[in-house]
Amino acid sequence: MKNLKLKKIIKKVKYQSGASLAEFAVVTAMMATFVGTSLPKFSDVMELSKQRKTIEELDKMIIQGMNFYNETVKMEGRGRFPGQDKYNMAVGGYVDIDSLVADLKLFKVANDSVISPKWVSVFGINNEKAPVRLGAGFIDDILEIENCSNCNPHRFPGHEEWITLFANETLISPYQDGHYIYVVIPGKGSGFDAKSPTLIVADAENPSVLYKIFNI
């Protein structure tokens, strides 16, 4: 009789344990589903946060570029942007807005071997705080010494002028492969026909969407 009761108890315990394990499996599966469905949403939030952050940084560059332009108007008579030897000289590989826009549509990765060499690093390709992604073809701005008539003798390479504008601070992209780059389309003409230069700044994470264009 005792053995019979013991068998019933053991059987009951086994049954309850089985039910508990089954319930645990269901709960675990539900948790896994919850985590799985939450991750993409969290990822989207993080991505949006990075996008907003880099747009804010690009806006800061536009503002500082505008300040630089206004100061050079006072000092030189014609405004220019950081890196320009003169108002009618380009920074980077573009001389008109149409070719720039055409390239921007295709410029989605930093290591684009055709487009990236046309762009210049804002804070320098050898900047320790914001290194350039391996394989990217961005360049540093250099002074044009020989072919620069009536240029300001106290000008500096673009990345040095940018760093000075930001009080020796470097803006760092929130993206792992990000890096701030820019070009300037030269101004031209004089008097009523004068056209000011155009400043374009971008994040190398994806310049086709992460960019700002400024023209006075």
Image (cartoon, grey):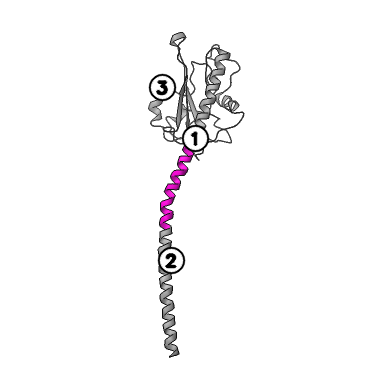
From what the image shows, is residue 209 above or below residue 78? Answer: below
- In this figure, what is the number of numbered marks? 3
Look at mark 1 in the image and give the residue it sits on. Answer: 54
Find residue 14 and report its image quarter: bottom left
Question: Dot 3 lies on which element?
Answer: helix
Check if residue 135 falls in the magenta segment.
no
From what the image shows, is residue 174 above or below residue 162? Answer: below
Q: Residue at x 40, y 71 (%)?
A: 19
Q: Amino acid at mark 3?
A: Ile
Number of residues whose C-alpha sits closer than 10 Å to that of mark 3, classed few (under 14), some (14–19) or many (20 or more):
some
Q: Main secondary structure of the magenta part?
A: helix
Look at mark 2 in the image and give the residue it sits on. Answer: 24
Q: Is residue 30 left or right of residue 140?
A: left
Number of residues whose C-alpha sits closer than 10 Å to that of mark 2, classed few (under 14), some (14–19) or many (20 or more):
few
Q: Is residue 82 visible?
A: no
From what the image shows, is residue 4 above or below residue 36? Answer: below
Q: Residue at x 46, y 8 (%)?
A: 191
Residue extent of the magenta highlight:
32-54
Q: Amino acid at mark 1?
A: Thr
**Which numbered disc flags the more N-terminal residue, 2 or 3?**
2
Q: Is residue 9 visible?
A: yes
Q: Nearer the viewer, mark 1 or mark 2?
A: 2
Residues tagged 3 and 1 counted as in contact (Cβ below 8 A): no
Look at mark 3 in the image and give the residue it sits on. Answer: 97
Q: Nearer the viewer, mark 2 or mark 3?
A: 2
Number of residues whose C-alpha sits closer than 10 Å to that of mark 1, classed few (under 14), some (14–19) or many (20 or more):
many
Instruction: Name the quarter where the N terminus is drawn.
Output: bottom left
Q: CA distance from mark 2 to mark 3?
A: 63 Å
